[in-house]
Amino acid sequence: MNIVDYLIVIAFLGTIFFIGSIFYKWVGTSDDFYLAGRNLTPFILAAVLAATNINLYSFIGQSGIAYKYGIPIIWQTWTGNMAMVFSGLFVIPIFRRLRIRTIPEFLEVRYSKGVRTLVAIIWVFRLAFWLGVILYTAVTAAQIITGVHSFTVLVLILSIVVIIYTMLGGMWSVALTDVIQFILMLSGALILLPIAMSFVGWWPGLVAKLPSNSLTLVQQTGKYSWKFVLAIFLLGIEWACVDQGLLQRAFGAENTKTVAKGLVLAAIITTPFALLWNLPGLAARIIFPHLANADQAVPLLLSHFIPNIILGIIVVGLFSSQLSATSGNLNGIATVFTSDIYENVLNRKATDKDVILVARIITVLAGIVMIVFAYAVPVLGGAVNAYLTVIAIMDMPLFIIAVVYGLLWKRANWKGAIVGYLSGAVAGVIGQYFYKLDFNLTTFISAGAALIITPIVSLMTKNEQSEKLSTIWKAKQISDEEKASNVVYHIIPKSAMGKFSLVIFFSGLVIFLIGIVMGSEGLQLASVISVVGMLMYFAGGLMKAFTN
Amino acid sequence: FDWRTWGIWLIGFIILVTWIIVPVREFKNLLKKRKKDLTK
């Protein structure tokens, strides 16, 4: 990078800081800070969701795996998008009708205050630590791309500005800077793809020069085979239904229908864009065939082939992805702590002014913890992986108690939920560390344990059907809020067009799964059929979100 | 700069312009709504 590139990056940081900070005046109530006053509209929500879900390591890490193992890693993004469509159409609208702010809050409505506090404490720590890990990976990638070798300088660039504007404007700042950052990160990625592909002779060049199965989407064997696609799809469903970073944005939607539109639009828009960082990884395999560290694939492409000034624009795009992921999750930590722990346990008489002050303090503290963790990652080494693995294992039982039993079985009670949640986590840890099982298998074992133990404990203990329970079941129907505003969303469609969209949606899902099963037999058309199924699934989802 | 490059950039440009125009319009409506709420 030269002086012009640095000036472009500085101008970007200054602009984002200015735009983020002016929304300080928009924060009048705690709902403004947490959820932008529930005013987010479909396209703004879609951009915010896409920007939050993609961080700098999504570009670098996924292209690194594509470099090493070929194209199938793209399913990580694609199945995640499919899961977002599913949760946006069928699950999150129920949560939105309950007007909750966090998943722990739902757990109190459904089970008890104890379950809420337990999950909230776990979420505060996991989000802060995860932010530290993605900051560390972003800085190590940025060192190669920018030529700035000081770890501290890059940590400060990628954290100070974002901590300040997130602290000042809460979700308003997060949402409106995310829209700008979404545009910038996609512009940057759009520049790189044609340049990388033209160097290797576009698609025919990839086919001719890469190992034979690098471009097979659904593979019969290998680390990223059909089993990976199936497992990551199921894990994606769990993520899209309980991830605070994603759900909090959806809770900020102006109404239930906007939730469905926003999630479907975000999923569909990021599906083609996943090619923008996977294909350059494949091209790098041809250009730099013997990299010891695959994560260097895209950074090396940038430093070798991108002229100055253009490089500055791409770096702005990469930094945008990091800042938007950081701001969304900092706001998530502040919301979970303030709403679920401070307001609910520590100070029940807190005024709106108290709450906003505490949320701002927590945003700054979470930012400091993130920076400390970023420095700790290389020192902790394997402990980081262990921590992230345990956290990922604990998500599955949470999904089981919150969504599967929480929304579908009235008899589940708080004792069953806590015992099921913790026994699922313990079963997963035993499978992972004592039996050394594959990670995907471990997550399903933990889900299975929660799935079996929650009903057993619930049936052995007192039936506690409260008034609150009926509000959850009522939320499956259109709410008074929707009737009053005349913008209704039917989870099960009423119109002929809506019903037709559901047929397309589920046909697409079945065809996608048939494609994956064909992949297990090594059949030639497996990849094509699974992609056709995915596209039908998206088309059905889009129709359903925009019809009734 | 062959046709494939321009093709990718054209599709990307259309999507990006959509994602600029529509959110700006939505934001303007938000401002109007906010103004109305504040004057109440």
Image (cartoon, coloured by chain):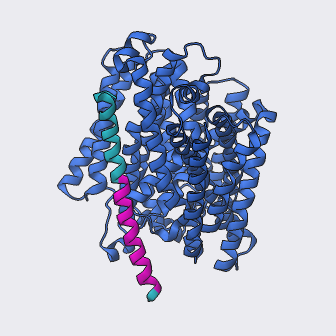
Chain colours: A blue, B cyan
Segment colored magenta: B19-38
Q: Quadrant of the N terminus of chain A?
A: top right
Q: Residue furthest bottom?
A: B40
A142 to the left or right of A251: right
Identity of the residue furthest to the right in this view: A379
Question: How far across and down, in percent of the image, does residue A500 sit?
Answer: 21, 48
Dominant secondary structure (helix, strand or loop) of the stretch shown in magenta = helix
Taking depth in this image into account, of A359 and A390 the one nearest to the observer is A359
Residue A543 lies, with reference to residue A293, above or below; the image says: below
Q: In the rendered image, which quarter contains the C terminus of chain A?
A: bottom left
Which residue is depicted at the point 29% across and 34% down? B7
- Work out whether residue A467 or residue A45 is closer to the camera in this orientation and state it: A45
Which residue is painted at 66% across and 72% down in the image?
Answer: A356
Residue pictured at 76% horizontal, 52% vertical: A369
| Residue A194 appearing in the image | yes
- Seen from the viewer's position, the closer of residues A308 and A417 is A308
Residue A546, picture quadrant:
bottom left
Query: Residue A257: horizontal and vertical position, in percent?
Result: 35, 61
Position of A447 compared to A183: left or right?
Answer: right
Q: Residue furthest front?
A: A3
Q: Residue at x 46, y 21 (%)?
A: A283
Does the stretch in magenta take in B32?
yes
Residue A404 seen in render? no
Identify whether A72 is placed above or below A164.
Answer: above
User: Could you tell me residue A265's position as x and y percent?
Assistant: 37, 50
Q: Position of residue A260 (x, y in %)?
A: 37, 56
Above or below A367: residue A71: above
